Image: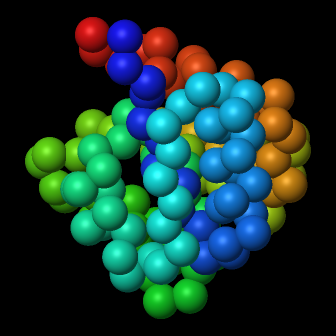
Amino acid sequence: MSKSKILVIDDDPKLSALLAFVLNRLGGYDVCEENRSFAALATAREFRPDVILLDVDMPGKDGGMVAAEIRKDASIAETPIVFVSSLITKSEEGIRNGSHYLSKPVEPAHLLETVRTLCRQLPS
């Protein structure tokens, strides 16, 4: 069985590395990091992730703009996106308007639980 693939898109290389470490070492996922919002779509097309973790507040293109680009690309449009942001509180985490949200700083256990749940929901 192959590992699920997770794409972390965040302009903070230290945070994306930390999320990648948790996902890879503790979750056993294949992880790709992208720190440039303008390159996120191309990276997603190439990597073909099962789940995307996407920062909301980034220079250049914000997370909403990146998500809109992803949703317009038929090859990756159905990929679950989890918005990760310091702009929301712990009480606002979860699913709103069909989108998943995690607040920063992300708790490793909650991150893994969210990703596992989304990976289980993927078609076989």
- Can the viewer see residue 96? no
- How far across and how far down the image is residue 100, in percent? 58, 40
Left or right: residue 4 compared with residue 21: left
Left or right: residue 37 compared with residue 55: left
- Can the viewer see residue 41? yes
Q: Is residue 16 above or below residue 49?
A: below
Question: Residue 38, located in which quarter of the rendered image?
Answer: bottom left
Residue lying at the far bottom in this picture: please name it.
60
The answer to which of 50 and 30 lies nearer the viewer is 30
How many numbered dots are placed on residues in this image? Answer: 0
* Image quarter of the C terminus: top left
Question: Residue 51, located in which quarter of the rendered image?
Answer: top left
Question: Residue 16, located in which quarter of the rendered image?
Answer: bottom right
- How far across and how far down the image is residue 1, in percent? 37, 11
Q: Residue at x 38, y 68 (%)?
A: 40
- How far across and how far down the image is residue 69, in percent? 28, 65
Q: Residue at x 85, y 40 (%)?
A: 107
The answer to which of 107 and 85 lies nearer the viewer is 107
Left or right: residue 30 compared with residue 38: right
Q: Is residue 72 above or below residue 57?
A: above
Q: Residue at x 39, y 60 (%)?
A: 67
- How far across and how far down the image is residue 112, in percent? 70, 28
Q: Residue at x 23, y 56 (%)?
A: 45
Task: State how the image is colored.
Answer: rainbow
The answer to which of 37 and 1 lies nearer the viewer is 1
